[in-house]
Amino acid sequence: MSQAPLRRQTGHVQLGPGVGRHPTRDIPQRAPTRATPAPVQTLAEAVVHWGRTRPSQPLFYFVDLEDRLSVLTAGDLHHNAMRLGSNLRARGVKPGDMVVLSFDTSPEFLECFFACGLVGATPCLIELPSSKVSVQSWGERLRVKLRLLNARAMLIDPDFVDLAHEALLDYQPEPGHEAPFVATPKDLVADAESFEPPTVDAEQVAFIQFTSGTTDAPKGVQISHRALMANCAAIGEGGQWDSDDLMVCWLPLYHDMGLVASTLSSFVHGLPTALIPPFGFLLKPSRWLWAMHYFRATSCFAPNFAYQLCVKRIKDAELEGLDLSAWERAYNAAEFIHADNVRQFTERFQPCGFEQDAWLPSYGMAEMVVGVSSRARNEPLRMETLSRSALASRRRAEPHPDGRGPDAFTVLSVGRMLNGIELRIVDDEGRPVSERQEGEILLRGTSLFSGYFKNPEATEAVLRDGWLYTGDLGYVADGELFICGRSKDLIIKAGENHHPYTMENAASQVAGIRVGCVAAVGVNNLQTGTEDIVIVCETTETKADALRQLCKHVEEMVYQGSGVRPNRVIPVAPHTVPKTTSGKIKRAYIRQNIEAFENLSLLVAPPARQAIVH
């Protein structure tokens, strides 16, 4: 087999004003047909299927941080994944073995991911070291996961291989198991004996994704081939995907929305995906929108904060010539969806061709592979303005009489259940509730996960009688689901339930507060016998007088936006509010360590200080 990977470097592209279209997307499109999944049962079979039936079709485009553009066709992917698979087999990787993957967005990651599937091994995804986590902490997490998995190998980005070797210096595997070998894709280029991919049962585990740990220690979510393929098919069916669609993804590929919703779902349907490293978007959000323009992309998944970031961070000069008219599906998922952010994004980018009908508010989680519900394209975008007091005191989703004032707040429908998924809403005793009554969301169906790896206690805590107890709160109206928040994040003040999302969104509107870096938590007050509402927010402001005014502004905005006034506002420096690897706020951690955050407040501490280790 050839040693050199087949990958086409096609030059450089600066995603910004003046860029044209990619040549493969700047041609008149034929009338599209409805996209259908490959007639296969596993991802490995899909690699072989597309490689043999459409070898010249581009499946993945990559724009890296240095603006280098490359493309991976179905034939090249098949060849490269088979070459890597041959080398893995030569190194002793067998069907059923666990292989840890730690990469940034790159062709090498996807080639290694699919190579594991071709040899019948199970890829297990973990993040790379980053500014969010110390190298020491990353090494500790790595050793715990390798020991839990009894991993046979670890494949890692070449820039971080030395850190992996260092982390494994004192690694002790489980008795009877060997320490994994560590390799980069460049280490797996030698000629190796070709092989025929083994037949894999659809009930076997396709991959393991570790939860990002918003409330507790990360757990290994096991996804079977059957559940994965069912969910990929359901996402495409629900979004009514067409044969000329193209997805753009800047989300991390070690989490469900980046890997499955954005990348594997498109791949299963034989549709291309254009990929950008997450840091490329965070550094310059306009790159995402220009990628939509350059590839004439039709679809993209993103969390609510990303759309908000575009509104606040992108300057008008960055929009000159931007054309978003091909964007038909703007999936908004993974965190609470704020109606005002949807409105602001639409108003800001409608002159560039973005239409409100493109919005597809959605709901999902790793334990259901990724997709649970979404707005159907043939149904209107549905919003409801509710009475905050009715929801807080009676858990009843009652329409507000006039839709104005602090008691009124708006929620968006996340649509109907995807094909093969059932929904139930229950009260605190597990009894089904009536329509418009808030309760816990329970799910079951074809996309249900296989349990947490080697963690039966955690599995039994969320799986009961075939139903997944999500911990999320919501209600149903006219067959559509509305999300209210998470039960563990509820703030209970004077007997009323308050969700943190509206408070955080209101605080984020204040100039000087960093978008997506605000946490609202409830902290027990022994004197009052109830919870105080505390807002922790990041800012670059350091002057005491300005900080006091900022806190007053935050307090007032939170009151206007949520109808409840916070007891304390704690301003902290950038990168202080802890987040999971997928970017979600760790509210439980903040609540448990609130005194430490008060000590880090910019109003009581100098700017240069020791950060919290989390």
Image (cartoon, rainbow, N blue to C red):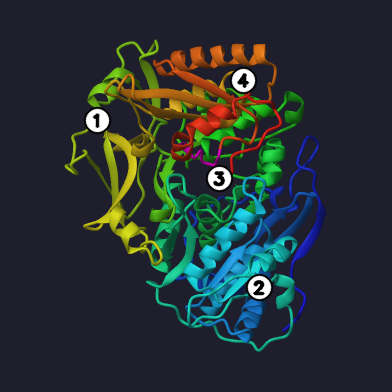
Does the rendering let one see residue 56? no
Asked which quadrant contains residue 301, the reply is top right
Q: Amino acid at mark 4?
A: Leu
Alpha carbons under labels 4 and 2: distance apart: 47 Å
Q: Amino acid at mark 1?
A: Arg
Q: Position of residue 45 (x, y in %)?
A: 51, 74
Residue hosting label 4? 603
Label 3's element?
loop
- The crowding category of the residue bearing disc 4, from other C-alpha atoms within 10 Å (few below 14, some 14 to 19, many at least 20), is some
Q: Nearer the viewer, mark 1 or mark 3?
A: 3
Residue hosting label 2? 182
Query: Which residue is at a point 71% across and 33% down the rendered structure image?
Result: 322
Task: Identify the mark at residue 156; answer none if there is no mark.
Answer: none
Residue hosting label 3? 614
Alpha carbons under labels 4 and 1: distance apart: 43 Å
Q: Amino acid at mark 3?
A: His
Left or right of residue 497, residue 103 in this image: right
Number of numbered discs visible in the structure rendering: 4
Alpha carbons under labels 4 and 3: distance apart: 22 Å
Alpha carbons under labels 2 and 3: distance apart: 27 Å
Alpha carbons under labels 1 and 3: distance apart: 38 Å
In the rendered image, the vertical position of residue 157 relative to residue 18, given as above or below: below
Q: Nearer the viewer, mark 4 or mark 2?
A: 4
Task: Identify the mark at residue 436; answer none if there is no mark.
Answer: 1
Q: Is residue 580 magenta?
A: yes
Q: Amino acid at mark 2?
A: Val
Left or right of residue 370, residue 329 in this image: right
Query: Which residue is at a point 53% across and 33% down the rendered structure image?
Result: 596
Q: Position of residue 334 (x, y in %)?
A: 47, 42
Part of the protein shown in magenta: 578-587
